[in-house]
Image (cartoon, helix red, strand yellow):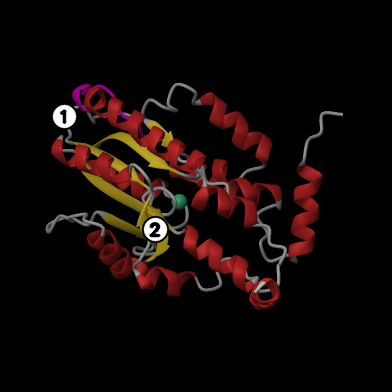
Amino acid sequence: MKTNAFVLIFVSLLALPEAKEHQGLMSTLFVQKSAEFYSNSVGIYNSAMDKLPELVEDENYTAALEQTSGFSGKPPAVILDIDQTVLDNIAYQARLIESGDYYPTGWDAWCMEEKAYYIPGVDKFLDLATSLGVEIFFVTNRTANLEEATRNNLEKLGFTFSKKLDQLLMKDEKPAWTSDKTSRRELIAKDYRIVMMIGDNFGDFVNLDINRSPTTNRNNVASMHDDMWGHSWFMLANPAYGDWEGALIGFDYRQPRAEQLKMKLKALDQQK
Ligand SMILES: [Mg+2]
């Protein structure tokens, strides 16, 4: 009996896939498995829900840097990013670890499966915004070919889209809609007062020149907006990827992974 059990364990171990080093392992486990990530995400959305009613009431307030005048009479809107802000794609990151690949391998196929979950807490936020009469816009750098799948995924989770309005603004859907989300925020600002923005990447709040600038500058500009964070700007933690990572490797994702790793190690600050 005992011997059989040992044999069983040994055979099971042999059947496990070979352990692979992957730069995404710890961040993926944190997002997927930790009470800590869950609590952080729900906490961010609870805080956003606390703030939303007063921002809707205050006609003299806008959360968008692009919106400088003439907004007080406009109806309120919120802007949310999609990936790791509304939809949780961490299962895709888990697949990359299994296959030893990195983004964008398999990304479009994952999106087309339409089975991402909601990020913890976002469903209640979307319900509250709807009940307050706030228009919801999703400004995402998912590309236009993924619009239908993204819409389907959100509808499967229970989100109801407007029939008369495009609430899902994809990258490259229009020539001006580049990775820089500024032009899409400007477009929304023409008809709405943007009362709140929620994202997981600095570019969900500021323009591309700042977002794709060196780490020190990104951090300096972030600290210049201390009055926005937790007031009308809410940032979800994304330890798996983002332009914070790009900044560490000069935004050159084409260089060999080993080179990228070297640059990341060099960026570590030991305060020596
Ligand atoms: Mg995102």
Find the magenta span and give its range: 56-65
Q: Where is residue 83 in the image (x, y as percent from the top left)?
A: 42, 54
**Residue at 82%, 29% in the rendered image:** 271
Say left or right for 200 vs 246: left
Mark 1 lies within 8 Å of ligand 1 (Cβ measured): no
**Residue at 24%, 39% in the rendered image:** 77
Label 1 crowd bin: few (<14), some (14–19), many (20+), radius 10 Å: few
Cβ–Cβ under 8 Å for marks 2 and 1: no
Disc 1 designates what residue?
73
Q: What element carries label 2?
A: loop
Say left or right for 264 vs 194: right
Residue 79, picture quadrant? top left
Disc 2 designates what residue?
176
Q: Where is residue 103 in the image (x, y as percent from the top left)?
A: 57, 66
Say left or right for 59 vs 21: left
- The N terminus lies in which quarter of the figure? bottom right
Compared with residue 22, is residue 191 higher up or lower down, i.e. above or below? above
Q: Where is residue 200 in the image (x, y as percent from the top left)?
A: 47, 44
The numbered mark, 2 or 1, whose residue comes first in the sequence reads 1
